[in-house]
Image (spheres, grey):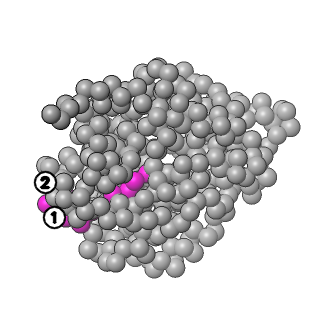
Amino acid sequence: MMTPRDVASLLESFPSEPLGHYPTPLDSVPRLGEALGLTLQIKRDDATGLAFGGNKIRQLEFYLGKALAQGADTILITGAVQSNYVRAAAGAAAKLGLRCHVQLEDRVPLYDESYVNNGNVLVDRLLGAIVHTYPEGEDEAGADARLYEIADEERRQGFNPYVIPLGPGNPPLGALGYVKGALELVEQLEDPSAIDAFVVPSGSGMTHGGFLLGLRLLGVSASVFGICVRRDAAAQAERIAANCRSIEELLGLSAIVSDADIRTADDVLSPGYGRLNDATYAAVLLAARTEGLLLDTVYAGRALAGLVHLAKEGDIAAGSKVVFLHTGGTPALFGYSEVLNDRLANETKPE
């Protein structure tokens, strides 16, 4: 166990660039909690500020800290068409006066006008990003390789590019943002030892892995449930384990996170990444209509659907004290507007 000062000192050895509004709020949500039979708080990382905020702002602070330290004038990043990460990177680049190339992968079989041109895609363009496309949605290595090809083209034109990679095997600088985020949250909690469970979306695994490691460094032993948004539970657990080993290595630490610490749940994953299911739609409506809280359908909404399932099945016991990490992604709601409007139109109208 480390003190907060010890953890902060570990992180200070890595360059970072302040981008967000911190600390983000920790809100009690009694009506939503009552609906789930829990005492529920939400860590509002949708409120990090820059370019609609979200969890990726914390991660980008460390990537862009390194980019600026290397004298970069251009950044490159890849993600799904409605990627929150891509949108946040474009916002950070605009704030810092950097050029930005974004690559949008064909990861979700949805081609209506809203998905292709609204939501995060519209924001990318408003922020001045240079937009590229990549035809494969499940080829992380290929998507990264294409970024490096674009970076080589940039160098030939006299620019100094920095690539923010997607796939595993790269130094997990972004995860440090959530080691730091865990520190922030623990300092906000009246009694961290009283929390029974934390619930986070689990996609690339940098947020989940960094957050889990940060909590364990600070002596917080509560379960951390990662709700799968892209891979099944077994594959995601392997990814989180690998991420945690990489973060520990980056920080010069021996093993902190054990296999038993890694809890992933894929009960609400079907039919796959970025595709709306009944459970996620119901969770989005529940948050909106009990707390005026807006969740996207890809990450935070699916994670809340996962929490609903865990509470219903007793994996998180009734009356438990739970903290849910809201990772943002609000602009993506407008990318899914046609899908959502179709569902809303079919709601049963009150008599």
Assign the C terminus to one quadrant of the image: top left
- Residues 340 and 203: in front is 340
- Residues 223 and 118: in front is 118
Residue at left offset 38%, top offset 56%: 325
Residue at image mark 1: 319
- Residues 351 and 180: in front is 351
Is disc 1 placed on a helix, strand or loop? loop
**Image quadrant in which you'd find residue 117:** top right
In the picture shown, does residue 128 fall above or below 307? Answer: above
How many neighbours does mark 2 have within 10 angstroms: few (below 14), some (14-19), or many (20 or more)? few
Q: CA distance from mark 1 to mark 2?
A: 11 Å
Give the residues in magenta.
314-327
Q: Position of residue 219 (x, y in %)?
A: 36, 74
Residue 234 seen from this side: no
Left or right? Give the position of 248 relative to 145: left
Q: Position of residue 282 (x, y in %)?
A: 25, 39
Assign the N terminus to one quadrant of the image: bottom left
In the picture shown, does residue 267 fall above or below 190? Answer: above
> Residue reaching furthest front?
351
Left or right? Give the position of 236 relative to 16: left
Residue at left offset 62%, top offset 37%: 124
Residue 222 is tagged as: none
- Residues 173 and 330: in front is 330
- Mark 1 or mark 2, earlier in chain: 2
Is disc 2 placed on a helix, strand or loop? loop
